[in-house]
Image: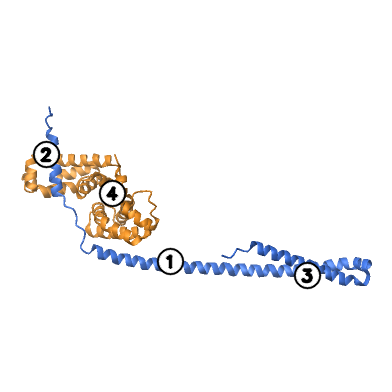
Amino acid sequence: MPTASADAASRDSDIAELLRAGHRERAFAELVQRYEGKIFRLCHTLLRERTQAQDAAQESLVRIWKSLDSYDGRASLSSWIYAITRNRCLTALERRRPMESLSDAGVETQIEALQAPAAQTTNDIAPLLRELVELLPERLRRTLLLYYFEERSLSEVALMLGCPEGTVKTQLFRARAALAEQLRRRGLDDPRHWLEAAS
Amino acid sequence: MIPPKKPSEDLDRALDAVLARVIERPQLPAQFRSHLEAALVRAGDRQLREQRERLEREQRERLAELDTHYVRLRRATLGTMIGGAFAAGAVATFTLPWLKASVGSQAPLVLASAGAALGLLIGVASWLQRRGSAPSSP
């Protein structure tokens, strides 16, 4: 079974070929076309803020353009691109005032305390779910959001976050289990109601 | 016989479906591409400026190095010439009486010829050495 990295490498073989042939600008144009959305979504997920995500995505692409000559093809192009993007986001996060970090128990407490009149009706399940997702522990939240942003592609999320697919699966399972538990506690454990409300 | 599905599986599937509907993909800002192009132009300008500054700095360093080398070479040459003149004077002082005794009145001429031959030998050796160490032209 081919790995995510091998799939990504074959997907970007045309760009790698252009780079080898010295067509740097064409390769970059193709890369932007293919990755700008993914880079922006990764930045948006990591930074949680649209303007900062836009800045970080642009900085990442400028960095990629500058470093394109030094890309040696050892890692797949997408892994390399996502690594640069994650580094830019980490730099942006370090520049920010350090945010208060909650332990898992703290997050649980916060989820419990979430004032949600919507918990009484199924009509407002969508905003409630969004709020619950935002309150998930950071790693679970990132994985869950990217999974749905990237049309449920485990391999793409693994590449974006730089971790194995197994880890993505585990984190997705935990995230959904935590959300289901919170909905159950609110008496919203009938799947038919969710689907009706979200449709 | 297919085993009955656990309720949690239904729940999980339904939650997956509802999350797929609820979680909206953030759209790329409309001006993203034009902002990116402007950022690339700015980055290119900065890169050119940095490259020019680096080249100018390297050239200054190379010139300073050449200048230092040239001064050192001139000092070494001057030192060698003065040292050589003193050594020649000393040799002449010590060998002239012995030469006079051996070859008579021709002694100064013999000494001058020997000095000239020695100088010529050193010159040729130095020229050959320099030619051997010079980088080959393309």
**Foreground tag (2 vs 4):** 4
Q: Is residue B30 above or below residue A1?
A: below
Q: Are marks 3 and 1 on the same chain?
A: yes
Is the Cβ of the residue at disc 2 closer than 8 Å to that at disc 1?
A: no
**Mark 4 and mark 3: span between their CA atoms?**
78 Å
Mark 3 vs 1, N-terminal side: 1
- Say which amino acid is labelled 2: Arg
Chain on which label 4 sits: A
Is the Cβ of the residue at disc 1 closer than 8 Å to that at disc 4?
A: no
Place of residue A41 in the rendered image (x, y in percent of width and height, measured from the top left): 23, 54
A122 with respect to B115 (left or right) = left
Where disc 2 sits, the SS reads helix
- Say which amino acid is labelled 3: Ala
Q: Quadrant of residue B100?
A: bottom right
Q: Are marks 2 and 3 on the same chain?
A: no
- Disc 2 target residue: A184
